Amino acid sequence: MELLSLLLCIAVIVITAMCLVRKINPQSILIIGGIVMMSLGVWFDINPVVPSAPTGNPAFDMVRIVEETFLSNLVRAGFMIATIGGYVAFMNHIQATKALVYIAVKPLSCFKRYPYAAALIAIPIGQLLFITTPSASGLGLLLVASMAPILIELGVSKLTALSVIVAATIFDQGPGSANTAMAARIIGIDAIDYFIRYQLPVVLPTGLVAIALFYLSNRYFDRKDALAGKDGESSAASDVERPDCPLYFAFLPILPLAVLVVFSPIVRLLPYTISINTTTAMLFSTFIALILVAISKRSAKIAFMDMSAFWSGMGTVFAGVVTLIVASEIFAKGLISLGFVDSLISYSTDMGLSGRHVAAIFSGVVFSAATLMGSGNAAFFSFGPLLPDIAVRLDIPLETLVLPLQLSASMGRAISPIAAVIVAIAGFSGVKPMDIAKRNTLPMVGALLFLIIANFVFL
């Protein structure tokens, strides 16, 4: 039965991939694929997924699972992503993004001759921000609004700019990360202790390797796109025209990030604690922007008319991005329901290899699972509870097994064309998710191999 379930998963994955390559509507294909696998999971009684309120009929239960997935995403991430999309659209409409580019390009003009240097510097900056804003899709959209326009104006191609923005989210690290909290809980230590003692010694050198590989990969694809006549090669930056808005609007695109950093419990710039999330920061920044537009144009009516861009942006992002994230989650549930993860674990542990070899294989398995599911959390949370028992059976330290698996999950997400962060920034930027995923594949595979080696060397 285990072999049959694995073969069925592979068959559904192959058919789904073929449909996506043929550009059939991805939301429909992923949802149908997920429902098929969940139905088979119920039929074979492997890991049946049931709704929180069963209907009493398996067919209607599948539909209710889709309904509950939509509702949970709207509450958890959907509204956040929609507000970020609305805010980005609002910033473009009032030309605040142009003001940011106009001001930022002048002091960064030295990078016009070396645009890839600017792109590489953006990666560690983004990774630092990711520690304080541990939402890959949320940070990705924020950087699309603030960092991407500057990089593009400096001469970086759009796809390279988007690729390095995803690179900012390749390591789920820091105490604010759900995967970090889960890993620390499995090992039995504090999240801060896990971050400092285990994550940093491995993440720092692995991050440097990833940055070097991102440079090589993006250079290759930009030159390839240039030969094919596509918009890929970095172009010479031109002088930016002064936008038709007050220049102090330039701080608005980065205001949400600034708010999140200032009030982050990790940074602790204030003597007292204020707990806010990404959605709260976005809405707060929107109200500030609305007030400033009304003051600058001396008309509340015009400000409210400009605000329509915010609502339109929310609708656009919801239709194109949030629905695809929901579809990806349903597909991931189908993989889990049909025993895909359990089968991989079983076959890996039955190979008779040493503990470290199996740990290395598991890292690749989790990496692949995250790529297929489009979620680092789903992949690691599926494996996490099983790791203490596996570590005992393999006779290896628990942290030696947990650390590479936890990090490889977020690295696998960075090459998944159905990952929320890639879908979100690609959908909003008007590019194909697969184009970003292809650019990230070499850096992530190379960094994964280094991670496995570094984990054994440093630990």
Image (cartoon, rainbow, N blue to C red):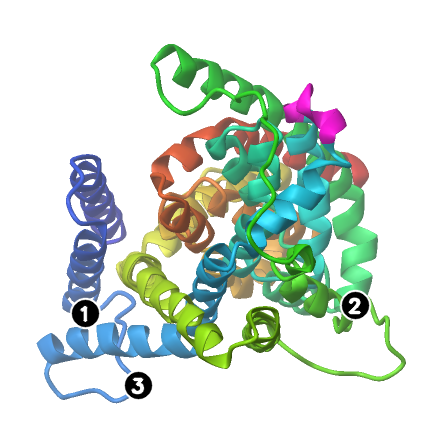
Q: Is residue 78 visible?
A: no
Residue 296: percent from left, percent from top: 61, 69
Q: In the rendered structure, which amino acid carries the disc numbered 1?
A: Val
User: In front: 78, or 242?
Assistant: 242
Magenta-highlighted residues: 109-116
Q: CA gap, disc 2 to disc 1?
A: 43 Å
Measured along the vertical axis of the image, is residue 410 above or below residue 153? below
User: In front: 117, or 311?
Assistant: 311
* Residue carrying label 1: 42
Measured along the vertical axis of the image, is residue 229 above or below residue 186? above
**What's the residue at 64%, 43% (across, down)?**
102
Q: In the rendered structure, which amino acid carries the disc numbered 2?
A: Ile
* Residue carrying label 3: 52
Residue 224: percent from left, percent from top: 42, 14
Q: Residues within 10 Å of mark 1 (few under 14, many from 20)?
A: some
User: In front: 196, or 361?
Assistant: 196
**What's the residue at 35%, 15% (across, down)?**
229
Q: Comparing marks 3 and 1, which lies closer to the viewer?
A: 3
- Mark 1 element type: helix
Which of the marked residues, 2 or 1, is nearer the chain's N terminus?
Answer: 1
Q: CA gap, disc 3 to disc 1?
A: 15 Å
* Residue carrying label 2: 266
**What's the residue at 12%, 79% (across, down)?**
60
Horizontal arrangement in the rendering, residue 451 relative to residue 376 (left or right): right
**What's the residue at 16%, 75% (across, down)?**
63
Question: What is the number of the mark on residue 336?
Answer: none
